[in-house]
Amino acid sequence: MKVYVVADLEGVSGVGGYDVHDLRSPLAASRRDRWLDLWTGEMNAAIDGALAAGAGEILVVDNHSSGDSLPAGGLRRPAQLLHGGARPTWLPGLDASCAAVVIVGQHAMAGDAHGHLRHTYSRRRLEWVRLNGREIGEAGLIAGIAGEHGVPVVCLTGDDRAVAELLALAPGAEGVAVKRSLSRRACVSIAVEESRERIRKGVALALGRRDEIEPVHFPAPLSLRVRYHRRDAWRAPARWLRSGCRLNWRGGRDLRLRGDLLQPIWDRFVGLHA
């Protein structure tokens, strides 16, 4: 059984920020090291759960920031880590050969008024993302893309708002909430040992029930609409629009992309900012 694991940072229990970039400060560097340790611990709990369910191949995809944040040296065997930028697609390696998708460390979507560390793809650029008029976050995007390959998202771990997003789309999936959102900057995290135990059990249970969990399907035609915080948030790659690709932009803060499949639509959007 091949399991595809999407890893993000902000939904990990005990993580209180988007990331730490100013490593000149000893306090900031210490905080980042602590967050990475917490993240690695939850990833290994998910790997243990997958192995307990009979996984023979586990591909972990670093989906945080530039895609090179998860410490490779801390992951347990036999997991493989897909990392780095300039990827051929947003979720490389996700195809019909995967038995299931597991999402670890997921955060609330952009536009969620009370979501802790809320954002979708880019907190600096995007105010919200909508698919066919419905607000959607990274959890929904992952589930929709996986569904196009016939693969279910069977488990999501992260904050309670991200769990709610997935369960609204895939009611049979397992949701493991390891933190409760209070506001954009405040949350209640459960104890580290408890979060890892819940993740281990939740992933094992979900993979054992994978045949009962339906893949998510969004009916065509699809219309993806993104709103930028500012008009100039994507001025640099605007020349890309001249290639067409069924884009619609009228000079404001909104961009619309249309198509029949979510993966090429979202890849098209991600390509604007590559």
Image: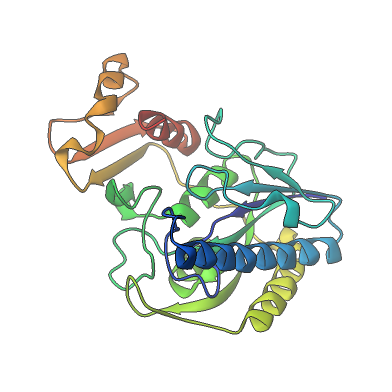
Q: Position of residue 34 (x, y in %)?
A: 58, 68
Q: Residue at x 17, y 36 (%)?
A: 232
Q: Position of residue 229 (x, y in %)?
A: 20, 48
Q: Quadrant of residue 244?
A: top left
Which residue occupies the foreground of this view, 205 or 75? 75
Q: Position of residue 215 (x, y in %)?
A: 60, 52
In this picture, residue 268 sits left or right of residue 102:
left
- Compared with 240, 156 (above or below) is below
Q: Residue at x 27, y 21 (%)?
A: 241
In this picture, residue 146 sits left or right of residue 52:
left
Whether residue 125 appears in this view of the structure is: yes
Which residue occupies the foreground of this view, 120 or 139? 120
Q: Quadrant of residue 24?
A: bottom left
Q: Position of residue 109 (x, y in %)?
A: 38, 60
In this picture, residue 219 sits left or right of residue 247:
right
Which residue occupies the foreground of this view, 104 or 150? 104
Q: Split into 4 quadrants, where in the image is the C terminus?
A: top left
Q: Residue at x 69, y 82 (%)?
A: 193
Whether residue 171 appears in this view of the structure is: no
